[in-house]
């Protein structure tokens, strides 16, 4: 009983002190604690835990990661098509896009064109290469404005779409350049949203990781975004079928060093997505 009274009395006394003490009367003591001689040492210790040292860079990420021997720019397009219009959409794309691809008047190449099989449904994906970078892209866009057939194609296509988006990409220096291949194949587009500031780390790890994924000639191309959704990475793979994909991916885990590279790259990722795609009849990547 006495102990309870003492505790109650102590609590009441403390409560009274807090009520009587103004906020300002407590600040000098707090300032004294936070401005002690130990603060620089504490700050240094905390920074050593949470602040990662980064080597100073004197060049843009694109110059450090992209291929030096080419100046190609890539455009990746995602078109979400009205379900009832997908067949008609594919038909007009197969008629018009190859003619642009084959016309030497346009400094661009249709790398591949697909429909998503697993992933976002009723979706078309197109990958273009512009030989000569941004000037080539500007030239193609300018010439297409004067192309009556393409203008009619765009008008017809717009009535078939729910939404569309695109990204401008550069190619990683350590990846294969996408070249036409015979089929039949299925394609997987693995897209990674990286944490800002981690693109160099990703490139360093995947420059080593890619050698584990070359045995079956499945690596088609690797790209990183320049315009559009930033800090995006896209890896494009080709497989005979879904079972072959499963076998090849499982085999990588038996190779010494693969597990370590996955361990270090996973924390760099904010979000990831996999699309399984079927090439359209006129796609150079079959």
Image: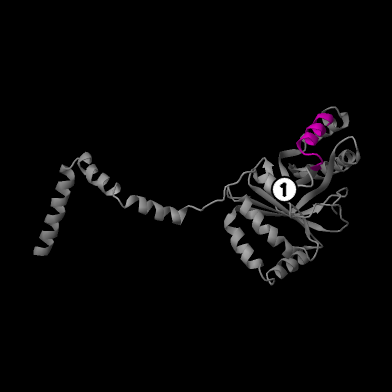
Mark 1 is surrounded, within 10 Å at the Cα level, by few (under 14), some (14 to 19) or many (20 or more) other residues, namely: many
- The image quarter containing residue 254 is bottom right
Q: Nearer the viewer, residue 132 or 77?
A: 132
Q: Residue at x 61, y 58 (%)?
A: 265
**Residue 286 pos. (x, y %):** 85, 54
Q: Is residue 57 visible?
A: yes
Q: Residue at x 46, y 54 (%)?
A: 50
- The image quarter containing residue 7 is bottom left
Majority secondary structure of the magenta segment? helix
Residue 181 is left or right of residue 267, and the answer is: right
Q: Nearer the viewer, residue 259 or 6?
A: 259
Q: Provide the residue span drawn in magenta.
A: 129-143
**Residue 232 pos. (x, y %):** 65, 48
Q: Secondary structure at mark 1?
A: loop
Residue 54 is left or right of residue 245, and the answer is: left
Please, is residue 90 above or below residue 285 in the view?
above
Q: Nearer the viewer, residue 87 or 116?
A: 116
Return the residue at label 1: 66
User: For residue 139: magenta?
Assistant: yes
Please, is residue 277 above or below residue 110 in the view?
below
The quadrant of the image that shows the N terminus is bottom left
Q: Nearer the viewer, residue 115 or 59?
A: 59
Q: Is residue 1 visible?
A: no
């Amino acid at each position: 009983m006495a102990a309870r009274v003492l505790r109650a009395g102590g609590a009441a006394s403390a409560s009274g002190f807090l009520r009587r003490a103004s906020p300002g009367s407590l600040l000098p003591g707090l300032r004294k604690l936070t401005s002690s001689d130990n603060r620089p040492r504490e700050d240094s210790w905390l920074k050593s835990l949470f602040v990662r040292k980064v080597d100073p860079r004197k060049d843009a990420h694109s110059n450090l990661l992209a291929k030096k021997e080419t100046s190609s720019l890539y455009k990746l397009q995602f078109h979400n098509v009205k379900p009832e219009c997908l067949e008609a959409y594919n038909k007009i794309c197969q008629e018009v896009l190859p003619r642009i691809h084959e016309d030497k008047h346009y400094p661009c190449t249709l790398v591949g064109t697909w429909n998503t099989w697993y992933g976002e449904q009723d979706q078309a994906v197109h990958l273009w290469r512009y030989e000569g970078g941004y000037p080539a892209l500007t030239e193609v866009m300018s010439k297409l404005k004067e192309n009556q057939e393409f203008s009619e194609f765009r008008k017809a296509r717009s009535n078939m779409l729910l939404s569309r988006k695109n990204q401008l990409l550069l190619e990683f220096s350590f990846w294969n350049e996408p070249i036409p291949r015979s089929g039949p194949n299925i394609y997987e587009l693995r897209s990674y949203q990286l944490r800002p500031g981690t693109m160099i780390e990703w490139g360093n790890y995947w420059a080593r990781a890619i050698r584990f994924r070359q045995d079956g000639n499945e690596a088609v191309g690797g790209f990183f975004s320049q315009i559009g959704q930033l800090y995006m990475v896209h890896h494009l793979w080709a497989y005979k079928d879904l079972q072959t994909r499963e076998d090849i991916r499982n085999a990588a885990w038996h190779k010494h060093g693969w597990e370590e590279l996955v361990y270090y790259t996973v924390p760099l990722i904010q979000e990831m997505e996999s699309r399984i795609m079927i090439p359209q009849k006129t796609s150079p990547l079959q």
